[in-house]
Image (cartoon, rainbow, N blue to C red):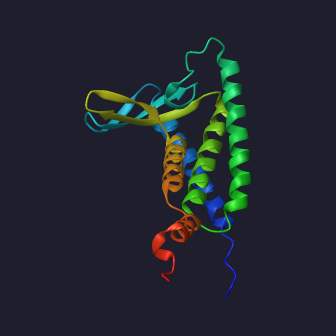
Amino acid sequence: MSPLRDRRGWLLGLSLLIIALDRYTKHWVSHHIELGSDIVLIPHVFALSHFLNPGAAFSMFSNSADPNRTRWILTTFSIVAAIVVFVILLRIGRRVTLAAVALALVLGGAIGNAWDRIAYGTVIDFLEVHIVHYRWPDFNVADSAIVIGGILLLLDSLRPRKQDQKQDQKKSPASVPKP
């Protein structure tokens, strides 16, 4: 039997792709859409906008009494989270699993938003979604990767494990031989 190929490079490549897409889209938006404006793509549903978010996801903490302190707390949190996720990804990333892909997405998203906070003091958000009468807070590629990664981690945690299935079979009366 041949040994499994190490997939950490591929997973880190996925993180780099998220960072590159995040950087490119934020650069494009900042050069093509005036701050505070938008380009409606699907009326009453979806637009590209240009919004600077000094807070966290969904503009939490954006009206902080000390914005500079909030910026550095969020930046520190993002960097620590990225380091933790990177270490975990190095440990479990030898194989491509749902959890490994999820962590690669979270890593890319965390670095993408940390980059903005360090370089500009705010995060550029530009995806504007309306659901019926509700306007979802603007977000970006990094936010999307973090949320998708989180959902994949949740789904992975809900999946039965092979080890759990083997233990269930051992406990099952059907697996006990009849005398």
Q: Is residue 35 above or below residue 156?
A: above
Q: Is residue 9 left or right of residue 135?
A: right
Q: Nearer the viewer, residue 142 or 168?
A: 168
* Marker count (numbered): 0
Q: Is residue 68 above or below residue 43?
A: above
Q: Residue at x 67, y 76 (%)?
A: 5
> Where's residue 125, x and y in %?
50, 34
Q: Residue at x 51, y 49 (%)?
A: 154
Q: Nearer the viewer, residue 75 or 102?
A: 102
Residue sticking out furthest to the top: 65
Query: Where on the picture, by quarter, is residue 11?
Result: bottom right
> Where's residue 124, x and y in %?
54, 33
Residue sticking out furthest to the front: 179
Q: Nearer the viewer, residue 66 or 89?
A: 89
Q: Residue at x 50, y 83 (%)?
A: 179
Q: Is residue 67 above or below residue 37?
A: above
Q: Residue at x 52, y 40 (%)?
A: 143
Q: Is residue 166 left or right of residue 136?
A: right
Q: Nearer the viewer, residue 124 or 144?
A: 144
> Where's residue 30, x and y in %?
52, 35
> Where's residue 47, x and y in %?
35, 37
